[in-house]
Image (cartoon, rainbow, N blue to C red):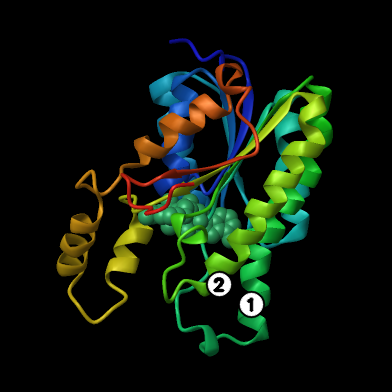
Amino acid sequence: MDLGLKGKVAIVGGASMGIGLGIANQLAHEGADLVIFARRLPKLEQAAAEIVRKYDVRVLPVAADIRDKDDSVRIVQAAIDAFGRLDILVNNDGAPPLGAIDSFDDVAWQKAIEQNLFSVIRMVRSALPHLTAAGGGSILNISAISAIQPIAGFALSVATWAGVIGYAKTLSIEIARHGINVNTICPGYIDTDRLQKVFASGTESPEAVRAKLITEIPLGRIGSTADIANLVALLVSPAGSYITGCTIPVDGGLLRALR
Ligand SMILES: NC(=O)c1ccc[n+]([C@@H]2O[C@H](COP(=O)([O-])OP(=O)(O)OC[C@H]3O[C@@H](n4cnc5c(N)ncnc54)[C@H](OP(=O)(O)O)[C@@H]3O)[C@@H](O)[C@H]2O)c1
């Protein structure tokens, strides 16, 4: 199925590795040109070169920290300067640290808000005029299943991503008339460096934690970055343009809820 992404321009955050890199690869496979960003440039440049080699699309790597408000403007401007248009914004990056709720002071909470919530607000603010000028487009946020089914120790993420879900739903209603859809994907356990760190953060061995978690997933496996990227490609494409305002778990059936 041709998703109609050839020649579209997408910004993909946190794309030097993990879920962001998987999304960048999938959009490039579908023919989109990309601006990818992360803080560490060497790894990002390596990712960009690899994507160009595999898919023969244009890829611009931009070193940026999503917690820096000027960087959100700079990333979008880089896309316009390089490609003259913007069709797709994928909000994805790292996440705040884990820990007990009462272990976090105001500074930690402020950083978490900057990383998860303000990053999305600022990127949307910068991108929106260009998505509108392009005659429509797509905004896609990556959050986590813990934002729907909270997990002890994940408070910084859960609280701030719940804000993203509320923001995204409201945004979807307000900008639908411009032909822009807005959706949020909530991954379950996805095989990335970050997940390895989560596995290693407790007292049990990472192997034991992994094995235990797999028993909780109805489909019986940890997800791959492609499991997320395949859905992203559909949602940001013309083929998925009637889907908006949704918060969608991609978790192998982990979430125990009717809606
Ligand atoms: N893996 C999972 O099981 C899972 C499950 C649910 C939700 N998620 C969420 O999905 C997102 C991606 O996770 P992942 O597993 O792919 O993580 P990852 O493998 O650690 O990759 C994170 C990416 O984001 C970049 N990044 C981190 N902080 C950044 C910042 N402040 N500004 C710009 N770029 C930044 C990293 O590059 P630099 O370090 O060079 O900046 C890297 O490219 C996270 O928000 C995570 O919480 C993951």
Q: Whole-Å distance between the Cαs marked 2 and 1? A: 7 Å
Compared to residue 121, the image places residue 236 above or below, namely above
Q: Answer with mark 2 or mark 1, whichever residue precedes in sequence.
A: 1
Residue 178 location (% of width, % of height): 81, 26
Q: Quadrant of the N terminus?
A: top left
Say which quarter of the image contains residue 250. Answer: top left
Packing grade of label 1 (10 A; few <14, some 14-19, many >=20) is: some
Of residues 47 and 249, the one drawn nearer to the viewer in this rendering: 249
- Name the amino acid, label 1: Trp
Look at the numbered discs 2 and 1 and tell me whether their residues touch, using CB distance below 8 Å: yes
Residue 116 location (% of width, % of height): 62, 60
Secondary structure category for the residue under label 2? helix
The residue singled out by tag 2 in the image is 156
Q: Where residue 109 is drawn, which disc sits there?
A: 1
Compared to residue 104, the image places residue 172 above or below, namely above
Compared to residue 162, the image places residue 167 above or below, namely above
Residue 56 location (% of width, % of height): 47, 18
